[in-house]
Image (cartoon, rainbow, N blue to C red):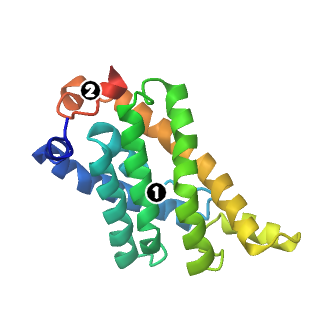
Amino acid sequence: MSLSQSLRREFSTQALVLIPVGIVLNIVVGQLASALKLPIFLDSIGTMLVALLVGPWAGALTGFLGNLIWGLITDPVAAPFALVALVIGLVTGLLARAGLFKHWWHALLSGVIVTLALAPVAILVRTYLFGGVTGSGADFITGYLLQVGQDLFGAVVVTVIASNLVDKVITALLAWGIVKYLPKRFTTRYPGAERVVG
């Protein structure tokens, strides 16, 4: 399938309806995690759902727009992480296409791979735009590491990988579980669902 065919298939009417739902889900759950100062983010569940149900490009768009919109309406810190969210959606969709969301252990492995893919971008944003501190619960990890003598870059690397590893594994498992147990009449409308539900 060519790129243009893939894009046409992914951006069907059903996909265009699902993308705003994914964006809202990201913002609502992410805002809740932020308000509770959790050490994880939970702000990419909508991105992963769209990537699994529709495909990598729709997932990437969901993540990117979700963070930009979130940054404009309630949390300015979210906007600079739009590229990180784009990577999450793109990589999740590509992993699903490769068959890495068929079983729960695939979803777990995919969460690890997504973390490794987003880490370089997130580390740069967190270090050079925010000096390591974004106001999230993960700042406790950075603060602790700085207190025990770690340099800023090293502290941010550990923070990004540790917090995202837990977050993306949980999010990938949740997204897999949701898609796996959605009614068949719903999942048959979306091209990517067959790679999850079989």
| Viewer-proximal residue among 130 and 29 | 130
Q: Nearer the viewer, mark 2 or mark 1?
A: 1
In the figure, is residue 47 to the left or right of 143? left
Q: Is residue 44 left or right of residue 21?
A: right
Q: Quadrant of the N terminus?
A: top left
Label 2: which secondary element: loop
Q: Residue at x 50, y 44 (%)?
A: 171
Which one is in front, 62 or 129?
Answer: 129
Residue nearer the viewer, 153 or 12: 153
Which element carries disc 1, helix, strand or loop?
Answer: loop
Q: Which residue is mark 2?
A: 183
Outermost residue toward the right in this view: 148
Vertical side of 183 occupied by 144: above or below? below
Q: Residues within 10 Å of mark 1 (few under 14, many from 20)?
A: many
Query: In this figure, which residue is indicated by the disc labeled 1?
Result: 43
Q: Residue at x 51, y 28 (%)?
A: 106
Q: Is residue 26 above or below residue 151?
A: above
Is residue 156 visible to the viewer in this orientation of the structure?
yes
Residue 81 percent location from the top left of the image: 47, 68
Q: Which residue is at 22% across, 33% downward?
A: 191
Q: Residue furthest top?
A: 198
Amino acid tagged 2? Pro
Circle 1: residue type: Asp
- Residue at the (21%, 45%) spot, across then down: 3
Q: Considering the image in quadrants, where does the C terminus appear?
A: top left
* CA separation in Å, label 2 and label 1: 24 Å
Q: Earlier along the polypeptide chain: callout 2 or callout 1?
A: 1
Instruction: Measuring from the top left, give residue 152's x and y in whole percent.
Output: 74, 74
Q: Is residue 41 visible?
A: no
